[in-house]
Image (spheres, grey):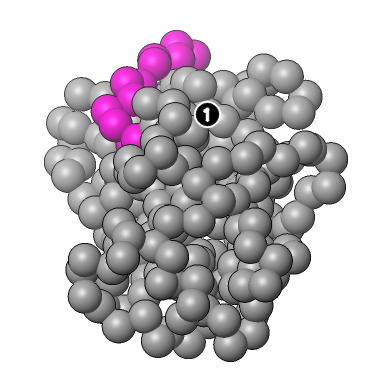
Amino acid sequence: MGFALKYGYSILCVVAVALLPAISHSQDYTCSRATYFGSPDCLGTPTGACGFGGYGRTVNDANVAGVSRLFKNGTGCGGCYQVSCKAPNLCSENGVNVVVTDYGEGDKTDFILSTRAYARMARPNMALELFAYGVVDIEFRMIPCRYSGYNLMFKVHEHSRFPEYLAIVLLYQAGQNEILAVELQQEDCKEWRGMRRAYGAVWDIPNPPKGAISLKLQVCGSAGVTWVQADNVLPSDWKAGVAYDSAIQLP
């Protein structure tokens, strides 16, 4: 019956209407295929390869996806896509807007959607018939992410150990951007130090500087490659598991 049906979970989920990422009409679509992963609550997974944790389970009302070639060794994490299936009798015109939170390979698919996201591709009352396909032909395009009311946030990863090891993950990454590099700087020091992409959207560094920490991102977007700086975004007593507001947002 298809990739995701082997999990045996219920697919009768409540599908909310609101979507956070905004649709862009400036790009052409790419044809591909999509399937879905089973989940008892129809949400995303907190253990996705992007390292988002619980954020990856519920962001964008759980309209999330695992991708393969679009993962780009983690650079694709947090990207937003409009995905529409191509069976006119079953599929809605606008499809669903999803956020990349995981890596996943299917049967010649580019997207493995959360159960909720897969259902949103269907016309009203046609979701069960769409689920019966298991894998469907789609068209997709990258779109800008919009998070109303949210700035870019830096979460100190739970595996961080104050003060000798710091790992961060970027949340609510707006726009149509990819993060190529992250550097950090101590408040009273002018030297920038590069962080390592540990995996997905997680960046780390041993022996981080003491004091309040500023972060600088190398961003590839519509304006080309630029640097964006968040001053003193991490306090001197940063704590694992806490997300800090940067007071900025990506364009």
- Amino acid type of the residue tagged 1 in the rendering: Ile
Q: Residue furthest right?
A: 26
Regarding residue 229, the answer to whether it shows in the image is no
Q: Is residue 106 above or below residue 3?
A: above
Pick the residue in front: 201 or 167.
Answer: 201
Pick the residue in front: 21 or 195.
Answer: 21
Tell me what residue is drawn at x 67 percent, y 20 percent. 226
Look at the image and give the residue range highlighted in magenta. 189-202
Callout 1: SS: strand
**Is residue 199 located in the magenta-colored stretch of the structure?**
yes
**Is residue 31 located in the magenta-colored stretch of the structure?**
no
Regarding residue 63, the answer to whether it shows in the image is yes
Q: Position of residue 209 (x, y in %)?
A: 30, 25
Tell me what residue is drawn at x 67 percent, y 18 percent. 225
Lateral position of residue 98 relative to residue 174, left or right: left
The residue pinned by badge 1 equals 179
Q: Is residue 207 above or below residue 47?
A: above
Image quadrant containing the N terminus:
bottom left
Quarter of the view holding residue 49: top left
Q: Residue furthest top?
A: 191
